[in-house]
Each structure stands twice: as structure tokens, then as C-alpha cells.
Amino acid sequence: MSIAAAEVGSHDTVDQNWRAHATCAQMDPDLFFAAGAIEHKVAKRICRSCPVRRECLAYAMEAPVDHGIWGGLTERERRRFRRRAGSDWRESFAQGA
Ligand code: SF4
């Protein structure tokens, strides 16, 4: 199972077709949920070239998912983004923030 297959649970009403195109689709999800700095760096590098990075990040922001690396951001980075953008985070995101 990959991160693309994880976290479906209660969020399964959201369009998740993007998951089929995830770079991590065949990877071990542990890499994306590990706490170490080296694992974060490796996972973020994978996310940078993922064709569905924005969809993945939007999903994690919308859910919200409070653990793991999604769309190339850690949970701490997602919280920071949400704090800075406030209630307009979707608009900031749409503008490429
Ligand atoms: S952005 Fe990263 S975590 Fe999200 S689907 Fe792509 S590779 Fe997986």
C-alpha cells in the first residue's frame, strides 16, 4: 500500500482519482510517515516530481490530514501554510502559494 492508497477511510467521498497517478503509488508509505529528517528529505524529493502534487496537497489540506508528508509538505508545513493563509488558504493555493 502506498500513501496514495492510505487515508481513504472517512474521506472517501472526495474525488480521489488523482491517486491513480501518484508517483508514490507503488512505494512503501512508511517513507512518507516517518519522523526522520532524512526520510522527509527523500519523500519531499519524490513529491517534487509527482504529477498530482497539488491534488495531493489540496486533499491533505481539505481533509485535513494531520500526519505524514502530502504534496511535499510535512504536517507542520501544512499547518504553517494554513495559519498564514487563514480562511483564504484555498485561494492562496489556487494562486500557486
Ligand atoms: S505528492 Fe507525494 S505524497 Fe502526494 S501522491 Fe505525489 S508522491 Fe505521493
Image: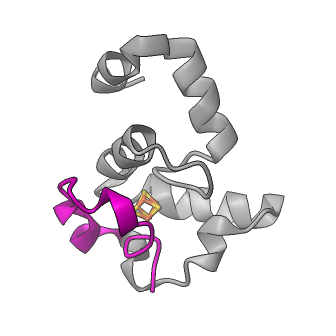
Q: Nearer the viewer, residue 23 or 67?
A: 67
Q: As displayed, is residue 81 above or below residue 51?
A: above
Residue 65 position within the rendered picture, expressed as x and y whole percent measured from the top left = 51, 50
Give the prevailing secondary structure in the magenta stretch: loop
* Magenta highlight range: 1-22
Give how far across and how far down residue 20 sits, in percent.
Answer: 23, 73
**Toward which corner of the image does residue 2 lie, by quadrant?**
bottom left
Which quarter holds ligand 1?
Answer: bottom left
Snapshot quadrant of residue 94: top left
Horizontal arrangement in the rendering, residue 71 relative to residue 36 (left or right): left
Q: Is residue 68 magenta?
A: no
Q: Position of residue 21 (x, y in %)?
A: 24, 69
Q: Is residue 8 visible?
A: no
Q: How is the image coloured?
A: one colour
Residue at point 59%, 48% (across, down): 66
- Residue farthest along the front direction in this orientation: 10
The C terminus sits in image quarter: top left
Q: Quarter-wise, where is residue 38 in the image?
A: bottom right
Lateral position of residue 34 relative to residue 26, left or right: right
Tell me, yes or no, if residue 28 can be seen here.
yes
Where residue 46 appears, x then y in whole percent?
A: 51, 64
